[in-house]
Amino acid sequence: MKELVIVSGKGGTGKTSISAALAFLAPQKVLVDCDVDAANFHLISGAIIRETHEFKAGFEPRVNEKTCTHCGICTKLCRFNAITNGVITTPLNCEGCGVCAFNCPDHAINMQEKQAGHWFVSDTRLGCLIHAELGLAMENSGKLVSKVRQEAKKIAENQHLPLIITDGPPGIGCPAIAALSGASLALAVVEPSASSMHDVKRLVDLVSHFDLPLAVCINKSTLHSENTQDLISWCDHNAIPIAGQIPYSNIFHNAVQSGKTVLEMPENSEVKDSLIKLWHNLAARLDLTD
Amino acid sequence: MLISIASGKGGTGKTTLALLLATAYSNITLVDCDVEEPNCHLFLQPEWQNPSREVTITIPHVNSSLCNGCGTCSAVCLFNAFAISGKTALLFDELCHSCGGCLLACPKDAISEEQKNIGTLMIGRAAAHPGIHLVSGVLQVGTPSAVPLIKKMKQETANLTGDVLLDCPPGTSCSMVTAVKDSNFCILVTEPTPFGRHDLELAMNITRLLQIPTGVVINKSDAATGDEIIEALCESRQIPVLAKIPHSLSFARQYAAGHISDEFRTVSSSIWNQLKTERGTTK
């Protein structure tokens, strides 16, 4: 079973639109939305939630009012200014480290597992989708990303599906790290803009850290032809294959507006052809016979 | 006044708006809190003050001559940052939250603390806009949490009296909250699409939780198809739409090339005018 992870370094380059187009073209697959902070794949694929699961991660302190003597030791020891004399004053500051609980002379504080979000299994017209929603202001998004990938793997194995398509999170931090580790191929979606070109270089550092095969897809390639040329030479120079170039088009915006993939839209064969070419390239790189 | 610019998701135009607002104003500090992917400097071409500063976090150090591998540190560490190997404790420093719990718990006093570098902080003045003071941070690739670096950058502006703009990281998790927290006003940038609406709602939940006055700017505004889904959401939450930035291919082309064009100057001055009222109430 192969796993294709679509990443970008920065947001807004078209990861979800391109993931959805590839999901439309790939015949047998499981889909994963790893952008647990701002999941959108369910909107474009018409997801109907079949299973909802709670995601617990990390801990939070609970103070027993009856035994707390408000001695202030917790305040002295807490490095995050989250607790004052036995009262959790700024819960958003709490890291859940347990220093207050373990060092309370009256054993008035205990640590409880924290509800940190949900993950879902949904049916969509493009296939089975695993997605998630991180609770507000929660950390551990890396853990939730690992969780949805794990569940997708189970489903792919049970149903003998050869491919997992993962719509990755933006950035290069813990969710991106969690989405990339152990993948078969990372596809970086890059725009020919100063920002996107800057960010992809940091992404390449991260991917090489994991020793993963990487390919680039240049999205909105006609937006700035000089930058596109620079990007091509940069990829050549660094021996990074370019799996596809998608011209700039309003069709992406229109598709999102109507909740469809670009390939389900009536117009613009140029964009569609370039996406089909991208899929064939990726399928060959992943050794999938389609 | 501390004004944060956030959006729930990436690519909606946070950096664009931050630059539009900064360049329309004569004396301002812009803090690029998107330390995973900082981009403001690409447009402002700042002359960095030397030297840039290394930002560190405190992590434990195990003195293996004192450690007997009793496992107390690993038992109290709720982040699983310790493993016991034979007669000594091993630290996985990328999991450490610097809480100091292990230090307090170790019965052999075998744990001390040391500093670990997680990124760099730079300060500069924009070459073409000397009124803009830029604070930028770069997180080291492979560092899981941006929070300590963002905190450090915000501390940098704590004593300033003028207006400070924060270009926040995307999402609604800990880095975004760290950046938005304590601001006097938060501008949420969105696109008029179902994706934009979905993520805007999540971001609005955060500013409500933090009790920060909030306004919305619709970027790539498209009267024909999408604005009304955003306007309806804003109305139901009683959050004002401060401005609309029309979709413009020429602006996008200039942006791709690393320039902020003057095309939307009136939009930025209108937003500043609306912020004046807020400024009167906060300082």
Image (cartoon, rainbow, N blue to C red):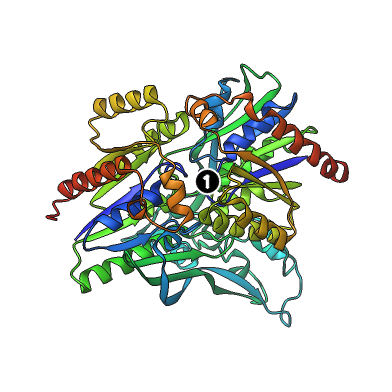
Q: Is residue B99 visible?
A: no
**Near-viewer residue (B206 or B71):** B206
Q: Quadrant of residue A149?
A: bottom left
Which percent across, then down, holds residue B71? 42, 65
| Residue, disc 1 | B146
Q: Is residue A207 visible?
A: yes
Q: Secondary structure at mark 1?
A: loop
- Left or right, A148 with respect to A100, comes to left
Quarter that holds the N terminus of chain A: bottom left
Q: Residue furthest right?
A: B280
Amino acid bearing label 1: Ala
B189 lies above or below A52:
above
**Near-viewer residue (A257 or B82):** A257
B213 lies above or below B51:
below
**Near-viewer residue (A38 or A249):** A249
- Left or right, B187 with respect to A119, comes to right
Chain holding disc 1:
B
Q: Residue at x 59, y 59 (%)?
A: B202
Which percent across, then down, holds residue B160? 77, 33
Q: Quadrant of residue A79?
A: bottom right
Q: Residue at x 42, y 59 (%)?
A: A44
- Left or right, B122 with respect to A218, comes to right
Quarter that holds the C terminus of chain A: bottom left
Q: Quadrant of residue A188?
A: top left
**Near-viewer residue (A162 or A182):** A162
